[in-house]
Amino acid sequence: MRSTFLGFNTATSGLFAAQRALDVTGHNIANVNTPGYSRQRLNQTQANAMRLPGGRGMLGTGANPISITQFRNEFLDFKYRSEVSSLGFWETKADGLRFLEAIFNEPSDTGITTVMDELFSSFQELSKNPENLTTRALVRQRAISFTNTVNHTYNQLEKMAVDLNFDINTTVNAINSYADQIAILNNQIYRAEVDGSHANDLRDQRNLLIDELSKLVNVEVVEVVDSNAFAGSKGSKMVLQINGQALVSHDRTYKLDASTEQPSSFDPELMMRQIRWANGDALDIRGLSGELRGLLDLRDGDSDSRKGVPFYIGELNKFVTKFAEEINDIHRSAYGLNGEFIAGIGNDTDGGGYLLFTSGKKFSSEMYDGGVLQSHLITAKNIQISLDIDADSNKIASAARIDLLPGDGSVALKLGELRHKSSMFEQGKPEDFIKSLISNLGVDTQEAIRMTTNQQFMLQQIDNQRQSVSGVSIDEEMSNMVRFQHAYNASARMITTMDEMLDVVINRIGLVGR
């Protein structure tokens, strides 16, 4: 039989359901600008109905709120994290390549091409007037400007590699920090959901951290059911993996380590951090993406497929070594104004005179080993004019034979004509080598910028889709607020009506005739 106060219970359940729905709506509105927040919804169902006697049906007993869930699409999350990893890679690559362009600074009035042209022009001037001391001083100064420019370019590239090394260490620390925060949230979520609840706000915080982590390095997110969980609980545990190896396993972290240092590929004296797992296992970078992979490619890339700082240092060294060799081969076989050769090295027929370029501040004699020129020692890092030339510009070679001194400038002319030697490099003339190098750098930079723009557009599209599912719409929430307010008011009115009915039964029935 129906209870006298059943109507109160039914109306009260509607009142409480509307009140809880208003609380959820208010929570959504309050977090409309919170990064990573997903809108929530109160799920409710009818309460268990009461069976009426005699097969006359079932009498409803009100509403029963069962859960508060959030709107989220896991596939869109997966797509977003995949694309944001690519964006992080291309943004890092574009920034690094733009910086490389600034280091080379070509074409410009201060780049390698300009100072090289000035050096060749000074040789031309020397060929016209080899006896002029002012012209000889100009050649010496142009040679010094060339070596200083090359040295400066190398030093800037080396400094960039050191800075990238620092960035890699910082990025690894950031990845480990995200892993720690996610592990803590995993444990909190597991404890909060052990009774079957939904820890929506904690999950939002975790998803935001995973999104930010994915820009640094691509991670695989796996949520597995805990077989040891209580019956009726969600009991899920999250695992984050990098290339199949766990970074986070529920509340435990397996961190990356960047403390090990190894010699760099372009300078054994320069130490670079190598990334390993904390247990010592090597990190396979072939499947990596994100900012970390971009930094590693820029710092360590030494091939056509991975053009980083070592690649451009290698190309610069290749240019300088060959260029110095060509200059020195002509210069050492000729005569300056003093008409002397280095004592004990060479003779008037096979050469052995002063070198224009050496590896560091050396005398020409120090560049010979058993009478064989060691020009391969000259690199972009150490190229300098020899101490002989630096101390005495009269030793700058200009004459082909000693008997033609002082007016012969044929050798100086040959030095000047090296600018047109198309067989010096595979790319052609010295200028062609630099232009080819800078052109390839420009193409790579444009590709990185273009890919960055494409990824930004793609990411924006995916994020718009995510927001259409998870984002809070003020208009929709205001509409819900009015709807739940009316439901609340109606339930309250229903309680008032039931109260008035019971008042009649309790206080008025039976008063007639008294």
Image (cartoon, rainbow, N blue to C red):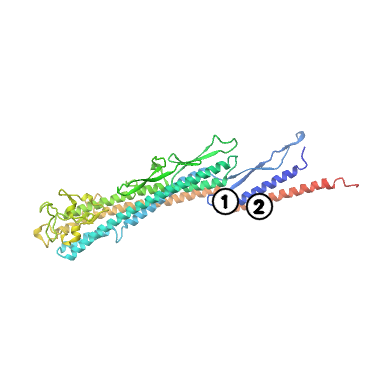
The residue at which mark 1 appears reads as: 472
Q: Which class describes the residues within 10 Å of circle 1: few (<14), some (14-19), or many (20+)? A: many
Q: Position of residue 18 (x, y in %)?
A: 67, 48
The residue at which mark 2 appears reads as: 482
Q: Is residue 268 left or right of residue 451?
A: left
Q: Is residue 233 left or right of residue 306?
A: right
Asked whether residue 391 is in view, the answer is yes
Task: Give the mark nearer the N terminus: 1 vs 2.
Answer: 1
- Alpha-carbon span between mark 1 and mark 2: 16 Å
Asked whether residue 86 is in view, the answer is no
Q: Position of residue 346 (x, y in %)?
A: 12, 51
Q: Which class describes the residues within 10 Å of circle 2: few (<14), some (14-19), or many (20+)? A: few
Task: Give the number of the disc on residue 221.
Answer: none
Q: Is residue 482 left or right of residue 168?
A: right
Q: Between 469 and 499, which is closer to the camera in this rendering?
A: 499
Say what amino acid the circle numbered 2 marks. Val
Say what amino acid the circle numbered 1 marks. Val
Image quadrant containing the N terminus: top right
Q: Position of residue 471 (x, y in %)?
A: 55, 50
